[in-house]
Image (cartoon, rainbow, N blue to C red):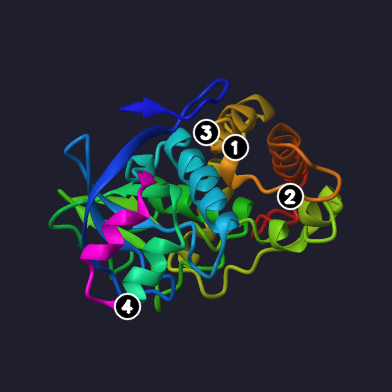
Amino acid sequence: MTATSLEGATLPTVGVTRYVTPLREGGSLPGIVEADDLGTYVCKFRGAGQGLRVLVAEVIVGELARRIGLLTPRLVALELDPEIARYEADEEVQDLLNASPGLNLGVDFLPGAFGFDEDLPAPNPVAASVLWLDAFCANVDRSWRNPNLLLWHGELWVIDHGAALYFHHGWSAGVTDPERFARQPWSVSDHVFGAHVPALPSADAELSAVVTPAALTEVLAAVPDGWLEPVPGAESPDALRAAYVAFLSARLGTRQWLPGGGA
């Protein structure tokens, strides 16, 4: 096992040894793979139509979840040799493997986990933490249609954060204004834990003390350089990391995004 060449935190890098099966629940066609560390992972491919920024969001929000005490599967960078595509009969899978050479995202596979389909009793600190994280990162994909929550060994795990941090999809012409994201409200109306809004003030006091600019800098160090595509105003990986830190730090300085947090 190696690690990506990063300062601060690192995302472990392992090699894919076998593609096992596709997961067809979502549009990006992630797959189960085996790796040379003997682990089994859900691979989210760099060549999928949603692009590299989805992988960046997965790392940032997943590592923030870990920092605030939520359970979330371990992440690795999966080194993929497209040569394994020759053994796949499914042409769609072949195309995806051939489009994804290099580092892809691996999410530790939780065998026997099943989808969460009920609410948690209020008050509940886990539900409040999930709600706070989704509001802070502008995650729009944790509704009852798609909770992105698993139960494993009797505990709740949060997964699939690629729909968060929508602001970076607007960077094609250059890095935009962090203050716009900082002030952007977030709707709780469709969230699985919407009933837990009354617990947000106490959760905010606790969690905002953990998600500091220094912590954000450490989290961004875990994103591989190769996933940070240059944009005008942030042409290097380090400059792009600094842009993410600036956007998230600016949001920490406001509370318009927090349901019930004031205008």
Query: How many angstroms separate mark 3 from mark 4 (CA)?
Result: 33 Å
The amino acid type, in three-letter code, at marker 1 is Asp
As helix, strand or loop, the secondary structure at mark 1 comes to: helix
Q: Position of residue 55 (x, y in %)?
A: 51, 53
Residue 2 seen in the figure = yes
Question: Sequence-wise, which precedes: disc 2 or disc 3?
Answer: 3
Query: Magenta part of the protein: which range?
Result: 79-90
The amino acid type, in three-letter code, at marker 2 is Arg
Whether residue 201 sits left or right of residue 48 in the image: it is: right
Question: Sequence-wise, which precedes: disc 4 or disc 1?
Answer: 4
Query: How many angstroms separate mark 2 from mark 4 (CA)?
Result: 48 Å
Residue at numbered disc 2: 255
Residue at numbered disc 3: 222
Question: Sequence-wise, which precedes: disc 2 or disc 1?
Answer: 1
In percent of the image, x 55 and y 42: which residue is there?
202
Q: Nearer the viewer, residue 70 or 164?
A: 164
Residue at numbered disc 4: 91
Q: Nearer the viewer, residue 158 or 33?
A: 33
In percent of the image, x 64 and y 29: which residue is there?
217
As helix, strand or loop, the secondary structure at mark 2 comes to: loop
Q: Quadrant of residue 28?
A: bottom left
As helix, strand or loop, the secondary structure at mark 3 comes to: loop
Question: Sequence-wise, which precedes: disc 3 or disc 4?
Answer: 4
Query: How many angstroms separate mark 2 from mark 3 (CA)?
Result: 27 Å
The amino acid type, in three-letter code, at marker 4 is Glu
- Dot 1, how many residues are within 10 Å of its Cα: few (below 14), some (14-19), or many (20+)? some
Residue 187 vertical placement versus 103 (above, below): below
Of the two numbered discs 3 and 1 in the rendering, the one whose residue sits closer to the viewer: 1
As helix, strand or loop, the secondary structure at mark 4 comes to: helix
Q: Residue 225: give its label.
A: 1
Pick the quarter of the image with the N terminus.
top left
